[in-house]
Amino acid sequence: MTKEKIVAEKIRVLLTEEEVNRRIGEVAAQINRDWAGKPLHLICVLKGGVFFMCELAKRLEGPVSLDFMSVSSYGSGTQSSGVVRIVKDLDEPLEGKNVLIVEDIIDSGRTLSYLIEILRRRNPANIELCTLLDKPERRVVQDVQVRYTCFTIPDEFVVGYGLDYDQKYRNLPYIGVVEF
Ligand code: PRP
């Protein structure tokens, strides 16, 4: 008989639900000022970006359309390889649109660098990046320009608000650090 070892992680709160929601409101206000009623086409990179996209989109005042994309990084382990395979492509063309890519976290920057390169070839009018969290200490690819960042965080393993550990904890309404 095999015995399954059940290990529960402890989660320490890094950013409370109130702090996250307040900051998303501030970033949304900045986007509203910058785009002043122009249509914005939000692209959510699944799965982590979905909670942030919903909260952000609710606070935008101009015309908003949404699309979703799922990518998977070649290679294994916790590091992305930089070569991205499109698992689910966008439904809509990007030609002439003001595109805002909405991400939960930018880590090495490899995923976004590759994704932006692919999406630029579809001739959007603009392509900008908005992220809930940024871990600049981990950046490997320097050419990723992030226009809107909610929080810059230290290099810790974070979960919640869309971010997972082994597919768990995405539904936490706050950002927590996993203490292994
Ligand atoms: C995360 C995140 C970014 C990527 C960032 O996705 O949503 O897409 O990793 O890492 P990088 O800057 O080092 O490339 P993940 O592959 O964990 O998928 P998920 O959103 O489905 O959890």
Image: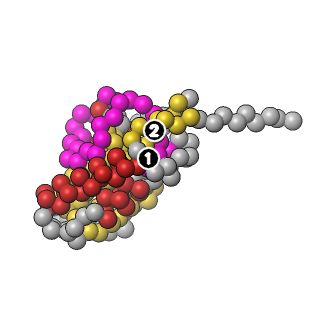
Asked if disc 2 and disc 1 are in contact, CB closer than 8 Å, the reply is yes
Residue 126: percent from left, percent from top: 17, 57
Asked if disc 2 is less than 8 Å from ligand 1, the answer is no
Q: Residue furthest bottom?
A: 63
Near-viewer residue (116 or 6): 6
| Residue 111 lies in quadrant | top left
Q: What whole-number distance in Å separates the C-alpha atoms at marks 2 and 1?
A: 7 Å
Q: Quadrant of the N terminus?
A: top right
Please give the residue where the numbered disc 2 appears in the rendered image.
Answer: 13
Residue 120, position as x, y percentages in the image: 23, 54
Q: Is residue 168 left or right of residue 24?
A: right
Rendered image: mark on residue 174: 1
Q: Which structural element holds mark 1?
A: loop
Please say whether residue 106 is one of the residues in the magenta stretch.
no
Residue 102 image point, x, y percent? 32, 53
The image shows residue 63, relative to residue 125, as above or below, that is: below
